[in-house]
Image (cartoon, rainbow, N blue to C red):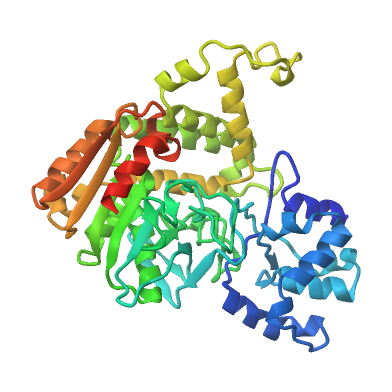
Amino acid sequence: MFHHYFRSCCGTSPRYAYTFVSDCDSKSATGCHSRRHSRHTGGRQRSRSSGVRRPLRYLSYHLGLEEKQMRLRYIEFLDENGVRVFDLNALYCLAHAGSPVMILAKLRVETRCYHMPNACMHALKKHILNGSFDMRRGRLQSPTFAYETWGRLNRDRDNAVLLFTGLSPSAHAASSPDDPSTGWWEDVIGPGKPIDTNRFYVICVNSLGSCFGSTGPSSIDPITARPYRLTFPVLTVEDIANGGAHILDNLGIDTLFAVAGASMGGMTALAFALQFPGRYQGFVSISSAARSLPFSIALRSLQREMIRNDPAWLNGEYDVEHGPVSGMRLARKLGMISYRSAWEWEARFGRERATIDVQDEDNPFGIDFEVEAYLEAHANKFIGSFDPNCYLYLSRAMDLFDASDWGGSTGAAMQRITAERVLIIGVESDFLFPLQQQQELAVALRSCISDVDFQRLPSLQGHDSFLVDMDRFRPAIARFF
């Protein structure tokens, strides 16, 4: 029983890879062990040095899982009162005192969290705000803001680069000694790379509302001891930016070398620049805009409808093991269509037929073309890696953002920007955030900032070009940094 359950938690299920992600940072988790878990260990307190590897070895041995496979997961449990108290270290203590089946009798697993790709325990850092966090349309109590860092902060504390992500990535933008797995912007961040970590201290924020460490709809509400789900407040891009500011306050950083982001991250960087003038020297916006156009709003609205119309969504109260898989698959497929370009797919797939191994003989309307197989593969990969409610909240946050809210018009709002230097990058084949939107932003910024560099790139990969067309993006980014 436990063997089967734990295998599903550790991501071996082909349909859903559920993992229980801890909102505690290393310090709070250590304290939690010493106070709450002593009753399970006869009053003994285990040292920090044995904290991770011993339980991993023990559990991997008994569960037949590779230790490396388990180390890439954060695990969290609730006690009988619905309070978050258990993690791998505590689970080891329980397992050492009794059989695996006995452990299940002592645990009530209720929260739904997800496999955290490329995020090791030692790489992900967390700031837990002590007190309430005011949002534009609500409030959170003691939220967690997750982030990763690369490089070192200099003596003057002015070499930091704050990076915000797109809708679905985690904070793991690049590999590091603590987590050598490849990050989503591996070719841009690192020693000797365009954002050179020999010179800069890079901070990548996991968005508030996400499911990769920061507080979101899948997190536990400390007031009710239940998952937020749809009781999570309306999320805005400004709230995500505000979370980044709290991280900077916690790190003792007053002024950034630059704030940067791509896609939704570019919107968040702009929201940060509007809310916190004077806290940055540079501003970088990539494949982003001052607002969403009706076309992109319509696409994301349809994605959200696909998820909500899945019978398994259950008004946000979906079951842990039976979430809205069909809705998420369709939403991801539509997203992939909007992220790339027709020109790329013509050159990449043409009318090439799908291979026999992906065809379904029992389905007369199954996969016939390679482009269909491509969408299917990406959709299946996305299932279980992202919480549906989190997707809904973050998607709507992009639609709600409008820079003109900060001045009555885009031009008036840009007067709040205090950057000395600005880099705006747009892609000719991007129809989700068309090039005209980056041009509009550059023109508005030039009315108040003299050094605004607008780069128009002829990449074929559409909106996702900043993730794949490194031959064009690296030089443009490197020149700014």
Question: Which of the 4 quarters of the picture holds residue 296?
Answer: top left
- Taking depth in this image into account, of 421 and 112 the one nearest to the observer is 421
Question: Which of the 4 quarters of the picture holds residue 64?
Answer: bottom right
Q: Is residue 409 visible?
A: no
Q: Residue furthest bottom?
A: 43
Q: Residue furthest front?
A: 192
Q: Is residue 364 left or right of residue 394?
A: right
Q: Is residue 3 left or right of residue 135?
A: right
25 over 395 or under it: above or below: below
Write the residue at 68% across / 80% down. 48
Write the residue at 19% across / 54% down. 421
Residue 50 image point, x, y percent = 74, 77
Q: Is residue 76 left or right of residue 135?
A: right
Please identify the quadrant where the N terminus is shown: bottom right
Residue 231 image point, x, y percent = 50, 57
Write the residue at 27% across / 50% down. 480
Q: How many marks?
A: 0
